[in-house]
Amino acid sequence: MSIERAPDRPGGQIYRLDPSTSLRREPFGGIAYSYATCRLQVIQSRLAVEVATRLDAGATVSEVVAWLARGDASRRAAATRQVATAIEGLVTSGVLVAATDAARPARIVRSGCVRE
């Protein structure tokens, strides 16, 4: 996955948590729970959890990269790779989705799991 192929808004790729997923930070990284599938996922990267949290709060990919690089231009390339890797893993596992796919329904019921 390339960040360049997923540009920020307007008209670019924006990521949010899957509407049926909740994310909780833990000392080792985090836990993602899908209310749609009743699937619990352990995320062993604190960075991946922070990336998901910031993107879901409305940050752009560029803003997350800038936060990770801490304003240091020499760190931007490494930060871009780290953020791209985190996004790719979170999308592959179903924790993050493209914002156009992330309209949050008021209630999801499936397999006995309920989220309001």
Image: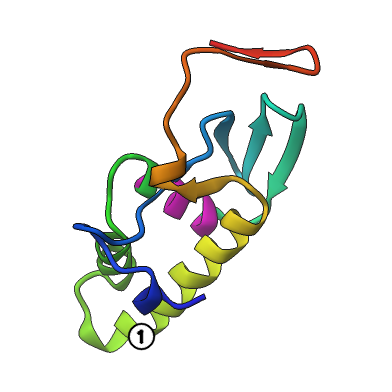
User: Which residue is drawn at the image coordinates 30% and 68% (left, top)?
Assistant: 7
Q: Is residue 5 above or below residue 12?
A: below
Spot occupied by residue 36 in the image (x, y as percentages of width and height): 69, 26
Residue under label 1:
77
Q: Is residue 37 above or below residue 53?
A: above
User: Which residue is drawn at the image coordinates 25% and 69% (left, top)?
Assistant: 70
Give, as a three-letter code, the residue at label 1.
Ala
Secondary structure at badge 1 equals helix
Q: In the image, is 102 to the left or to the right of 44?
A: left
Q: In the image, is 33 to the left or to the right of 48?
A: right
Magenta span contains residue 53: yes
Q: In the image, is 37 to the left or to the right of 85?
A: right
- The figure's colour scheme reads rainbow
Q: Is residue 74 above or below residue 31?
A: below
- How packed mark 1 is, by other alpha carbons closer than 10 Å (few <14, some 14-19, many 20 or more), is few
Which residue sits furthest bottom?
A: 74
Spot occupied by residue 79 in the image (x, y as percentages of width and height): 38, 76
Spot occupied by residue 18 in the image (x, y as percentages of width and height): 53, 38
**Residue 114 falls in image quadrant:** top right
Q: In the image, is 85 to the left or to the right of 92?
A: left
Which residues fall within the magenta stretch? 47-54
User: Which of 67 and 98 lies nearest the eye of the viewer?
Assistant: 98
User: Which residue is drawn at the image coordinates 61% and 62% (left, top)?
Assistant: 89
Magenta span contains residue 111: no
Q: How many marks?
A: 1
Spot occupied by residue 87 in the image (x, y as percentages of width and height): 51, 61
User: Which residue is drawn at the image coordinates 76% and 27% (left, top)?
Assistant: 38
